Image (spheres, grey):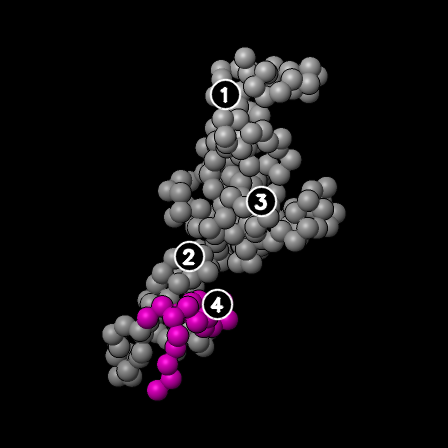
Amino acid sequence: MKTYKKNQPLGSYGCLFLEEVDRKISAAGNVRRCARFKCPCGATFSASIGNVTSGQVRSCGCLRVVAVLRRCLTHGHSPAKGGTRLYRFWQSMKDRCINPRSSGYRHYGGRGIEMHGPWVDDFWAFRCWFKRTFDMEDIPQDRSMDRIDNDGPYAPGNLRVATLEEQASNKRNNHYLMFQGRKMTLAQVARAVGMKPGTLWRRLAVKQQSVEEAVK
């Protein structure tokens, strides 16, 4: 009897084997080995091992949802239907990572930033992951999405829903200052002392004051 290792990919869509569970008897009387799997969208599900390895079962069901949506010609998230911020984010990360003609490609795909493979041509898989991870239908108006590690991929585990201030503090080109023994962005220092960032910047850049002088 063939054995499988935990997190071993099986089938054409790459579902990960987690553990074998109770066997089931089909209507024809055949005994089927069943297991729990992790779908590329992140959800877990149970299915016959034979059905997964043969390709009869390729996902937790998210692919069927995508197929129905495609037959209906629209998923209701695209700009043509008023759009959602989540869909625009998906379009943007795809453009940045895989479109060499994009104005931002050199800062992303051009320097090795990749997009999680199952999301590239499957917005619905990305949406299922987003909803399950953040318990939201869309990105709130006062929030945005960014990568936790700016040198890492657009992938599960490296994306967060952040305030605009948190996102600004995570940019590669931020100017960092040492203040009270901590490495902080200019905006963080200004907020800590109750000063406008523009005022602090002028004192540092124009008047050439030290951080200690500028915050007085």
Q: What kind of element bears circle 3?
A: loop
Rendered view: 29 above or below 63: below
Q: Position of residue 202 (x, y in %)?
A: 66, 16
Q: Position of residue 19 (x, y in %)?
A: 32, 70
Which dot, 1 or 2, sits closer to the camera?
A: 1
Q: How far is disc 3 from disc 4 in space, using C-alphas?
A: 27 Å
For mark 3, what is the residue? 150
**3 or 2: tag closer to the N-terminus:** 2
For mark 2, what is the residue? 42
Residue occupying the point 65% across, 17% down:
209
Q: Which residues are magenta?
A: 1-19
Q: How far is disc 1 from disc 3 in space, using C-alphas?
A: 23 Å
Residue occupying the point 26% across, 77% down:
23
For mark 1, what is the residue? 191
Which dot, 1 or 4, sits closer to the camera?
A: 1
Which dot, 3 or 2, sits closer to the camera?
A: 3
Q: Residues within 10 Å of mark 2 (few under 14, many from 20)?
A: many
Q: Residues within 10 Å of mark 4 (few under 14, many from 20)?
A: many
